Image (cartoon, coloured by chain):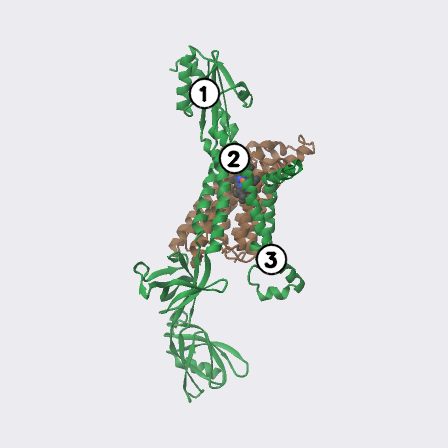
């Protein structure tokens, strides 16, 4: 068994899970929803094994390091965290439909990584040889994943709100399976309540690492600045909830804008802007 | 003060207390921060200056776009955020403080109306026995209650983690502490850079603003080395450094190893491995094609030298042992770049142990000179980033407060329960500052348990 085989199994499982969730949406058959969730769990398990194997394989090659060092490894880790956060949400709240809006993020990530990127294990360049890499990447990506889940929930919120405003709440069989609008609003908030502290920790560990490695905890490098932009947007979201006139739809939009900024911070900065971070160079 | 004056002051105060301002500032800061990630900051690359029109350049410059995170309007927004925070806290804290310090301990009917899901049921036995039971129950199942008597009725108040209401203010305070740390760092610290030759020492560094800064001690570079992975990628850059006070090595700072991600700190000044180079000499013998007129040529570091035939040469890379790159060959080799007098440029490798290859190369090109490599006297220098930041501890303190504060603000809740015993009836209600629904479920379980205990039935 090799990690690359298991990563392919993972990608396939997420694809199946996503399709099952879509079928669940269309048919409203409970069994399909359960099957979609089981496929997602299976994929998560396969991916966990695969990441562990890749870690071990790097040691066998004599360049041992946690599999978090380049774009490929980070995208794989990102989709793992998304499914992990979804699984936790599913265990706690059991709103299965949310899978249809979250699994596509994980599936797209894995498909892009497996098909479009160099999957080779590379030795760590000196700049990344630090335990801070682990703390920094893990906290950031768990935060990003929570925001991905919040974004999926916000999209559901806006669809449901639009349908209810249009007065055709009965017509959409699909929509009737969505959790009530109040619940979606609350779940959005809860996901961000998980993501915001993690992002805060991610920014702080990044600053601590920068300070430790080159003596400045903050240098307004584009990646740093974008992480701060994301942080401002979600801070605005949190305050939106205690401000009259900003709840509901506007909060959902803030959550979506926040996730768009998150994705730009993660990928766009490297593809379009220059800076210190290493996940650059597209497929490389 | 006239009443219009007072209205004016009030409206200014309300403006600074308002959450609308907070939203505007947070979203505004997010939006304008984008500028500095698109437009280059600091020293402008020449290609950029060429691309952009002079008029645009002038406008951007006057708006401070090229150093926007230090521009007056960006700093102003940060100040406004701070004022907003402080004003909002001044306005709200007294009320929160009162909630914590002087809780409502009497379960009046007014208080009852402010809660949802209040439950009442009769108790068995006399009020004194019920009172003791309720007190013991609250203490063991929730928190030790405050018991008071009023008009012959018994009132109980119990609460958990009231202080977590202050967590939000802890987060807000932490933002200000981080600002203070950053300001201290920019006023009393500096960032600089220094190159040190192997075997030499320095006692001052050049700051980013091109000021010579005296360290107050000396730093010597004993050695610098680079290690590679098998595939040729760099693995480690290592400087061996010694701190000298009055020319004498400081015991714990002698032969200290500094690599990327592992700096050296002495007296609050930290040295980070950043770059390196070779300033040593390379030795060559240059002759005509037939081996006549040999001359010795020395190339210093990255300099270029002029050869007898008018061409010029510099060294781009060198190795002590060429066999890693070219199996079958051995000994030192150097890659040189030769600019002939007729304007041609070529790059090739010359060897110390394989003079025949050097001659062959020259012959293939028809003309001289023949260059033989004689080896190098390596002399590496290390490039160190230097930083002093006396505010950094304060920044970390702020970060710690922020993380703890956010955790408490999100995941802890101030929970309160009130109980009243009045005319044989027990009334119970409560609320929580977070996750009210979850607390309500918890309260329902407590109520049913209390009911069994007070109804006189013994659980078997
Ligand atoms: C970068 C700046 C800021 C950060 C990181 C921040 C962070 C937070 C956080 C994490 C919460 C808790 C939210 C929740 O429980 O959902 C909060 C609440 C709050 N913030 Fe801020 N905040 C900032 C700026 C401000 C400013 C400028 C104001 C000024 C008006 C403000 C006023 C409030 C208020 C009134 C609350 C609610 C307090 C309560 O629930 O009793 N915040 N803030």
Q: Which residue is mark 1?
A: B156
Q: Position of residue B9 (x, y in %)?
A: 62, 39
Q: Are marks 1 and 3 on the same chain?
A: yes
Which chain is mark 2 on? B
Q: Residues within 10 Å of mark 1 (few under 14, many from 20)?
A: many
User: Quick check: B449 above or below B201?
Assistant: above
User: Quick check: B402 above or below B425?
Assistant: below
User: Quick check: B334 above or below A108?
Assistant: below
- The answer to whether residue A13 is visible is no
Colour brown belongs to chain = A
Q: CA distance from mark 1 to mark 3?
A: 62 Å
Q: Residues within 10 Å of mark 3 (few under 14, many from 20)?
A: some
Q: Which residue is mark 3?
A: B64
Q: Nearer the viewer, residue A19 or B298?
A: B298
Which chain is mark 3 on? B
Q: Residue furthest top?
A: B125
Look at the numbered discs 1 and 2 and tell me whether their residues touch, using CB distance below 8 Å.
no
């Amino acid at each position: 068994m090799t990690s690359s085989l298991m990563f392919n199994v993972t990608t396939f499982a997420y694809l199946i899970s996503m399709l099952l969730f879509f079928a669940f949406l269309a048919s409203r058959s409970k069994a399909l929803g359960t099957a979609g969730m089981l496929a997602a769990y299976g994929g998560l398990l396969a991916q966990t094994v695969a990441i562990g194997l890749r870690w071990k394989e790097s040691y066998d090659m004599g360049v041992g390091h946690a599999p978090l060092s380049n774009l490929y490894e980070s995208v794989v880790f990102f989709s793992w965290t998304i499914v992990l956060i979804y699984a936790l949400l599913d265990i706690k709240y059991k709103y299965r439909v949310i899978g249809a809006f979250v699994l596509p993020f994980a599936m797209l990530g894995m498909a892009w990584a497996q098909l479009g990127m160099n999957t080779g294990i590379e030795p760590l360049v000196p700049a990344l040889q630090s335990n801070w890499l682990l703390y920094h990447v893990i906290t950031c990506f768990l935060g990003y994943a929570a925001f991905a889940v919040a974004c999926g929930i916000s999209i559901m919120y806006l669809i449901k709100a639009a349908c209810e405003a249009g007065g055709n709440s009965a017509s959409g069989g699909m929509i009737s399976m969505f959790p009530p609008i109040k619940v979606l609003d609350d779940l959005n908030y809860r996901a961000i309540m998980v993501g915001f502290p993690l992002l805060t920790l991610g920014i702080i560990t990044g600053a601590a690492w920068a300070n430790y490695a080159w003596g400045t905890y903050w240098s307004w490098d584009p990646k740093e600045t974008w992480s701060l932009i994301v942080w401002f947007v979600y801070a605005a979201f949190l305050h939106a909830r205690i401000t009259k006139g900003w709840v509901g739809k506007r909060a959902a939009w803030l959550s979506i804008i926040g996730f768009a900024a998150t994705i730009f911070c993660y990928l766009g900065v490297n593809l379009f802007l220059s800076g210190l971070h290493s996940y650059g160079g597209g497929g490389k | 003060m006239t009443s219009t004056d007072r209205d004016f002051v009030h409206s200014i105060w309300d403006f600074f207390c308002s959450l609308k301002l907070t939203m505007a500032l947070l979203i505004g800061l997010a939006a304008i921060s984008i500028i500095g990630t698109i437009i280059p900051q600091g020293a402008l690359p020449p290609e950029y200056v060429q691309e952009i029109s002079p008029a645009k350049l002038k406008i951007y410059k006057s708006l401070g776009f090229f150093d926007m995170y230090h521009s007056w309007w960006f700093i102003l927004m940060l100040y406004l955020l701070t004022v907003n925070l402080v004003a909002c806290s001044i306005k709200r804290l007294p009320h929160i403080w009162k909630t914590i310090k002087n809780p409502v301990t009497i379960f009046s009917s007014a208080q009852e109306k402010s809660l949802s899901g209040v439950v009442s049921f009769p108790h068995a036995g006399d009020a004194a026995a019920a009172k003791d039971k309720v007190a013991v129950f609250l203490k063991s199942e929730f928190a030790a209650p405050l018991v008071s008597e009023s008009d012959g009725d018994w009132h109980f108040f119990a609460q958990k983690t009231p202080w977590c209401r202050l967590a939000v203010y802890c987060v807000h305070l932490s933002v200000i502490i981080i600002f203070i740390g950053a300001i201290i760092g920019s006023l009393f610290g500096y960032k600089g850079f220094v190159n040190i030759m192997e075997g030499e020492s320095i006692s001052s560094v050049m700051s980013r603003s091109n000021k010579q800064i005296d360290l107050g001690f000396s730093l010597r570079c004993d050695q610098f080395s680079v290690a590679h992975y098998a595939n040729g990628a760099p693995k480690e850059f290592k400087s061996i450094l010694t701190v000298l006070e009055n020319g004498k090595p400081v015991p714990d700072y002698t032969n200290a190893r500094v690599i990327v991600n592992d700096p050296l700190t002495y007296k609050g000044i930290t040295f980070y491995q950043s770059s390196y180079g070779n300033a040593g000499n390379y030795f060559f013998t240059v002759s005509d094609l037939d081996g006549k007129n040999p001359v010795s040529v020395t190339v210093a570091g990255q300099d270029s030298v002029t050869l007898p035939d008018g061409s010029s040469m510099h060294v781009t890379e060198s190795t002590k042992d060429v066999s890693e790159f070219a199996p079958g060959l051995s000994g030192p080799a150097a890659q040189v770049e030769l600019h002939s007098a007729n304007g041609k440029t070529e790059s090739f490798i010359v060897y110390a142990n394989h003079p025949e290859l050097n001659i062959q190369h020259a012959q293939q090109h028809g003309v001289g000179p023949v260059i033989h490599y004689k080896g190098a006297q390596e002399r590496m220098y290390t490039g160190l980033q230097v930083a002093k930041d006396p505010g950094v501890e304060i920044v970390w303190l702020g970060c710690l407060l922020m993380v703890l504060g956010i955790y408490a603000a999100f995941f802890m809740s101030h929970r309160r329960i009130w109980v009243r015993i009045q005319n044989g009836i027990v009334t119970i209600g409560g609320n929580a500052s977070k996750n009210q629904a979850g607390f309500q479920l918890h309260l329902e379980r407590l109520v049913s348990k209390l009911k069994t205990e007070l109804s006189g039935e013994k659980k078997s």
